[in-house]
């Protein structure tokens, strides 16, 4: 008996590696989350695509709250079971007429997890469509091995390392359009990308990264937050969650995590000869 997804949606995810659309919050709530992000952006004077990358939930309690929404966790539980860890959250904000894009990639090659059971939830705060850079996936790509990536560090690539798959057949891509407050889900091995925003308004979304509690890091001990169920395994240290916006304790942890990622301490699992 599923909690949020239909049996058909669960079967679609298992076969194709993605499913959409589901509703997490209403459009008014989505607009309020957008205001929270843009208020943070204005007060910090920094690009949220950098400061709220990797573990953006450490900056704002509102992000933690959204990542704990029952509608989202019910859908996640339908796919990975009742004991759920949130190990990361990222904001992806493309400005109007923004040349930035997300290249084709698989999260599994750099998340450094085993076994490969992570599910990404992408929540739209604005419309996401073919004009403004909707998320695209390659159906069935989750069922094979990790594919070879090239780290390009391209200027307009929104990924931290510009990691890019080569040889992707664009004709096989499927778009996942969403209205504000809706979300999509994809497997960590599902190849995905998004194009530049050709509209006049921003396209903003949250990506939340969930794993069942038995999944562990292959790059040393890392931090996560138990958002549902029980952690019977102890593979993760606890995140320092913010008690208020820009809590210095959690912001310090966020800065350390970003530094480790950029310095290569959190390396691609493929480079670690991780067990599969």
Image: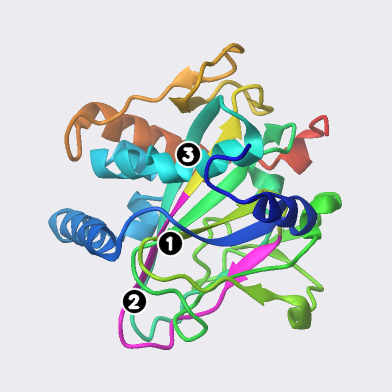
Q: Residue at x 80, y 50 (%)?
A: 146
Labels 2 and 3: the sequence-earlier one:
3
Looking at the picture, the colour scheme in use is rainbow
Q: Nearer the viewer, mark 2 or mark 3?
A: 3
Looking at the rendering, the stretch of residues picked out in magenta corresponds to 191-207
Given residues 97 and 174, the one toward you in this image is 174
How far separated are the C-alphas under marks 1 and 3?
A: 14 Å
10 Å crowding of disc 3: few (<14), some (14-19), many (20+) = many
Q: Which mark is residue 73?
A: 3
Position of residue 212 measured from the top left corner of the image (x, y, whole percent): 61, 29
Position of residue 101 measured from the top left corner of the image (x, y, whole percent): 52, 73
Q: From where the camera sits, is residue 266 visible?
A: no
Q: Residue at x 13, y 55 (%)?
A: 43
Q: Residue at x 49, y 56 (%)?
A: 122
Residue that numbered label 2 is attached to: 95
Residue 199 falls inside the magenta stretch: yes
Labels 1 and 3: the sequence-earlier one:
3
């Amino acid at each position: 008996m599923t909690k949020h997804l239909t049996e058909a949606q669960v079967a679609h995810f298992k076969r194709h590696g993605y499913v959409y659309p589901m509703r997490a919050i209403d459009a008014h709530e989505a607009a309020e989350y957008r205001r929270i992000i843009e208020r943070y952006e204005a007060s910090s004077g920094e690009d949220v695509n950098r400061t709220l990358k990797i573990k953006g939930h450490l900056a704002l309690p509102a992000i933690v709250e959204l990542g704990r929404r029952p509608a989202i966790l019910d859908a996640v539980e339908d796919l990975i079971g009742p004991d759920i860890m949130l190990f990361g959250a990222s904001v992806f904000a493309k400005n109007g007429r923004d040349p930035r894009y997300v290249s084709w990639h698989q999260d599994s090659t750099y998340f450094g997890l085993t076994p490969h059971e992570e599910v990404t939830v992408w929540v739209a705060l604005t419309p996401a469509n073919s004009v403004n850079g909707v998320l695209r996936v390659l159906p069935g790509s989750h069922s094979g091995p990790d594919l070879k990536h090239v780290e390009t560090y391209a200027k307009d690539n929104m990924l931290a390392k510009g990691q890019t798959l080569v040889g992707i057949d664009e004709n096989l891509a499927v778009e996942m359009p969403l209205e504000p407050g809706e979300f999509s889900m994809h497997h960590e091995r599902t190849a995905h990308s998004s194009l530049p925003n050709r509209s006049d308004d921003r396209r903003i979304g949250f990506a939340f990264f969930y794993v069942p509690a038995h999944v562990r890091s292959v790059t040393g001990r890392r931090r996560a937050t138990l958002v549902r169920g029980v952690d019977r395994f102890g593979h993760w240290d606890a995140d320092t969650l913010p008690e208020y916006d820009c809590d210095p304790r959690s912001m310090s942890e966020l800065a350390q995590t970003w530094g480790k990622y950029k310095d290569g301490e959190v390396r691609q699992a493929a480079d670690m000869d991780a067990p599969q």
